[in-house]
Amino acid sequence: MHIPPHDNDNRPIIDINDAKVPYAFFNRVTLNRDEEFVYELKEYESCIVPVTGSIIVNVYSLDERLIGNRMNNVWDGEPEGVYVPTGLTAKIKCACDQAEIFIAGAKYSEQLRPFYIMGEDVDVVQYGSDDTKTHRKIKHILGQKQNGKVGRLLVSELFTVGKGGWSGFPPHKHDTDRDGETHHDEVYNFRFDPKEGFALQLLQGENKKVGDAHHIVDGSTFVIDKGYHPCVVAPGYQMYYFTILAGKSQRSLVQYFQPEYSWQVETIPGIKDMIAKFK
């Protein structure tokens, strides 16, 4: 499901117990200097990530700390964040002229401990090649490094390397808990450089010959509850998408590749390392 860019007025774009992706949560918050935003999710753990700008976050036992070093856009530095356990109140205060903040969440009943994610805590993996048109960099904010500290939530920033090319390829899905696959709800938010860029996000049901193509622009949100979902960005543009994965029964992600195209896993440099980082 494609949600076009809009002013959400700091209200969740994907709220708790969403009809399509009940295990995921997503909010986009914009604040001006000294403005504050307070939230509490009783059934969901969450992660606060400043997209641009700097913020001060107050959560339970954590000392207040300034996070966020990207003043212009998502290509302007490394991500930072704060893990907020289920049921705790978080207060965000803007410490610059204007900040844009993403709040990612996953349904999880146990209350863990809050912590910061700084630059050195982000796990970066790059894979693919120009020849295969799959060159991509992934910055895991809540990834393998945070195993044991997080319940069901995976949070990453994905970048196409160069101008144009495929992402999420070979086509894969993760909508069923079974041997060789896990059920993970997924939510994306896209950005492009230059901003006029666009992509096509494909979504194909498991038993369908032909899927649906969605025209993705800067600020689009895309919701994936089931089906294969590769994406391609137009030539001449870099693409970024913020990725939320919320597991139904476990945090570790197991992707099921579409059988007709799964042979290409053997042809894309580094893709097996990329797959392992989501586990």
Image: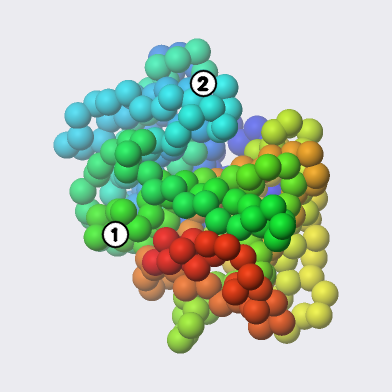
Occupied quadrant, residue 229: bottom right
Tell me if 206 is positioned left or right of 91 in this view. right
Q: Which residue is mark 2?
A: 71
Tell me if 5 is positioned left or right of 23 in this view. right
Q: Looking at the picture, does residue 2 appear above or below residue 251? A: above
Q: Which residue is mark 1?
A: 147
Image spot of residue 1 (x, y percent): 69, 58
Q: Residue furthest left?
A: 61
Q: Residue at x 65, y 38 (%)?
A: 191
Image spot of residue 136 (x, y percent): 60, 51
Q: How many marks?
A: 2
Q: Residue at x 51, y 33 (%)?
A: 51
Image spot of residue 15 (x, y percent): 52, 51
Tell me if 46 is positioned left or right of 213 in this view. left
Q: Residue at x 40, y 17 (%)?
A: 95
Q: Looking at the picture, does residue 227 appear above or below residue 46? A: below
Mark 1–mark 2 Cα distance, whole angstroms, equals 30 Å
Image spot of residue 201 (x, y percent): 73, 57
Does the image show residue 231?
Answer: no
> Is 104 in front, or is 134?
134
Three-letter amino acid code of the residue under disc 1: Asn
Circle 2: element type: loop
